[in-house]
Image (cartoon, helix red, strand yellow):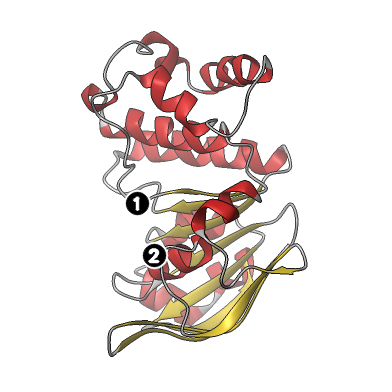
Amino acid sequence: MLEIHALDSHYGRIQALRGIELKIAEGELVALVGANGAGKTTLLRAISGVQPVTGGGIVFEGQDITRLSPSRRVAQGILQVPEGRQVFGPLPVEDNLRLGAYRRRGPDVEADLRRMYEMFPILEQKRRQPAGTLSGGQQQMLALSRALMGHPRLLLLDEPSMGLAPLLVAEIFAAIQRLKAAGTTIFLVEQNAHAALAIADRGYVLETGIVVLSDTGPALLADDRVKEAYLGV
């Protein structure tokens, strides 16, 4: 579904990504792990089109999208749940959800709203409240649901566990596993390497903008280099 070839990206003179090679097949959950500052968010932003690519290319479902605008990528089904949630705080929860479906019309939007409320019942309870009044975990549920309202072909998740209590992390990751089981293709960026690799089909390890390891999720969990650097073992 997604192929990244020799991808470079810069912030001014600083090279943030160097020669990235990465593939995601349809229906896979692929994890990208690494320390703060490794370039994980930069790579997601490059896939979304909001971070310039200075070398290499991105192919989505057979089409080169390296120079496509972010809005065109959304139209093709590439949707991102950003780091820090980025909900529209003053707007009610339900309006945030409807914004996720802004490209769509018709009764299926209402059906999807019901589906989101079934997935996260707390959102239905608080549907008329401003999104900014939700807890961090509830905002993460909202941000994930908002992206799902856009019917993603490829769902990009940026640090969904950041700042959440362990019980909420477990709930978010359980929801991600349900999405995968339903056939959603997911690219998961996480600092919590153990949680991410435990549910991933395959994983990549990023260090200072370079992919240094790639393998199946279980194999990376068992790799001594990953254990020492990211799992505290």
Quadrant (top left/top right/bottom left/bottom right) for the N terminus: bottom right
| Residue assigned mark 1 | 83
Tell me which numbered mark, 2 or 1, is placed earlier along the sequence.
2
Q: Position of residue 75 (x, y in %)?
A: 62, 47
Indicate whether 206 appears above or below 172: below
| Cβ atoms at labels 2 and 1 below 8 Å apart | yes
| Residue assigned mark 2 | 41
Instruction: Tell me which residue sits at (50%, 66%) in the image.
Output: 32
Residue 97 seen: yes
Q: Position of residue 49 (x, y in %)?
A: 49, 63
Q: Position of residue 179 (x, y in %)?
A: 63, 38
Indicate whether 157 appears above or below 191: above
Q: Amino acid at mark 2?
A: Thr
Instruction: Tell me which residue sits at (40%, 82%) in the image.
Output: 207
Q: Amino acid at mark 1?
A: Glu
Q: Position of residue 21 (x, y in %)?
A: 60, 82
**SS state under label 1:** loop
